[in-house]
Amino acid sequence: METMMWSIFFLVIGIFVGVLAVIVINSLKGNNAEKKAAKFLEDAKKEAEKQKRDRLLEIKEESYKLKQELDTELKQKKAEMKEVEDRLLQRETSLDKRDEMLQKRDAMLDEKDSNILAKQKELQEKEAKMDEMYKEEMTLLESIAKFSKEKAHDMIMKRVESDMTKEITTYCKEKEQEAKLNAHEKAKQIIVESMSRYSEDVASEQTVSTISLPSDEMKGRLIGREGRNIRTIESVTGVDLIIDDTPEAIVISSFDPLRREIAKITIETLIKDGRIHPARIEEVYDKVCKDMNTKITELGNEAIYELGITKMDPELINLVGKLHFRTSYGQNALQHSKEVAHLAGLMATELGENVMLAKRAGLLHDIGKSIDFEVEGSHVEIGVDIAKKYHEDELVINAIASHHGDTEKNSIIAALVEVADTLSAARPGARNDSLDNYIKRLEQLEEIGNSFEGVEKTFAMQAGREVRVIVKPDEVDDQSSYKIAREMKEKIENTMQYPGTIKIIVIRESRAQEEAK
């Protein structure tokens, strides 16, 4: 179509050019040129017709080609449409078959449902008959056995309960022993490792001090005229001065180590000075007290420096230093407090707790002993008041209050301080204890063990660290022996005061006896 349009356009242009040429020729050459113009016009017309015919032929050819292409394309489209129709017919056929199969399946399912309903109804009828027969048999059995179903059920449940109680008790006992064993092994490992990393010499403090004299003449000078010097010394220092037949020696006796130390330094200074009279005694005593206060502060600073503790009130440091002159069963209180701090810090390291807080709580756990001669109350109560006064951490206060079990522990650190305190106090040689107290503790342990019913004999062993209770096998079974051990543990904890722990072992012997005749 585009080619035909161009052909028509060129044809119009040719005609226009020919007409224009004729007009131009006629206007320029006049009449002579008319013939030429007519000829030229005729030639132009012929040429134009020729071109017209040629273009028409081309247009026809192109139209024919286009028609052929359109016919081919239409045939292809028809073939494709036929294929699509064939596929649709096939799909429709398959859908019809599937629909037929589904209808057959629905019919089969309906038939099965009907059969199932019928069988279910039949089973229900059979179950109803079985229930009736069961009731009849139970009624018959109850009448024959003269024993109701409820009584039989109760009897079986009681028997099962009895059997299960024993099994549960045994199971609980095994699990508790297993847990105790694991906990004991882990705790023992931590404690042993902590103790191996911290070792300190065993040192026992005494309640008397001995002063060597240059000669026995000095005894008379210390006594003074009519005993005025010795009376002044004893009244000023608060100690007892024992002057006996021991050659060139006197003894200072006092349960307060601080007073004893001040008195010892005062008397030694007087002996060196040689001037011994009441006024001089008081003067020297006042000077020694001032020097001792400085020494106490130095001892407190050395203790916190050794432990790496910082930011402590100066007055509290002074109280820590005073612990050096306080003993418990012969054990130096400051040395004991430092030992507890070291052990608590090492165990806190093993458990991932705050090491510095554990050391601080360990050092201050017995701080009340520094002034328990001056203030009424137990050293625990005094220590709690001191810690609160100097704004110590709540964990430290709780550790002080609970290290003897008087208050519930609120933290791991409080438990570590209690363990460290027990280790430091109970280790061999740490403290002196009188024979009377030792024997009394053993007798009390044996009395507690013998107080339980079914106990044949009780033996306190290993310096009161272990108690073995032998029970009568015909009166006490295995479960009861376990109960005796627990009740004895609670009674010992509630009625006795003792360092460390006490192991309780209940022994029940089983005997098989026969006589051969």
Image (tube, helix red, strand yellow):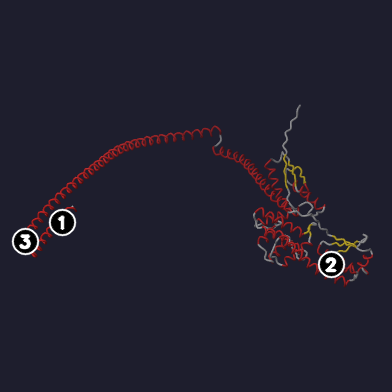
Residue 34's disc is 3
- Residue at the (66%, 44%) spot, across then down: 177
Which quadrant would the C terminus be assigned to in this image? top right
Q: Secondary structure at mark 2?
A: helix
Residue 113's disc is none
Whole-percent x and y of residue 472?
A: 73, 40
Whole-percent x and y of residue 435?
A: 82, 52
What is the crowding at mark 1: few (fewer than 14 residues within 10 Å), some, or many (at least 20)? some
Q: Which residue is mark 1?
A: 10
Specify whether 250 is left or right of 152.
right
Which one is closest to the eye, mark 3 or mark 1? 3
Residues at marks 3 and 1, CA–CA distance in whole angstroms: 25 Å
Q: Relative to 456, is 399 above or below?
A: below
Q: Is 354 or 250 nearer to us in this picture?
A: 354
Q: Secondary structure at mark 3?
A: helix
Among all residues in the image, which is located at the extreme bottom? 279
Q: Relative to 468, is 325 above or below?
A: below
Determine which quarter of the picture holds residue 259.
Answer: bottom right
Q: Which residue is mark 2?
A: 237
Counting residues from the start of the chain, the first of labels 3 and 1 encountered is 1
At label 1, which amino acid type do we have?
Phe
Residues at marks 3 and 2, CA–CA distance in whole angstroms: 170 Å
Q: Relative to 231, is 434 above or below?
A: above
Specify whether 130 is left or right of 381.
left
Among all residues in the image, which is located at the extreme top? 517
Q: Are marks 2 and 1 in contact (CB under 8 Å)?
A: no
Q: Secondary structure at mark 1?
A: helix
What is the crowding at mark 2: few (fewer than 14 residues within 10 Å), some, or many (at least 20)? many
At label 2, which amino acid type do we have?
Thr
Q: Is 290 or 375 nearer to us in this picture?
A: 290
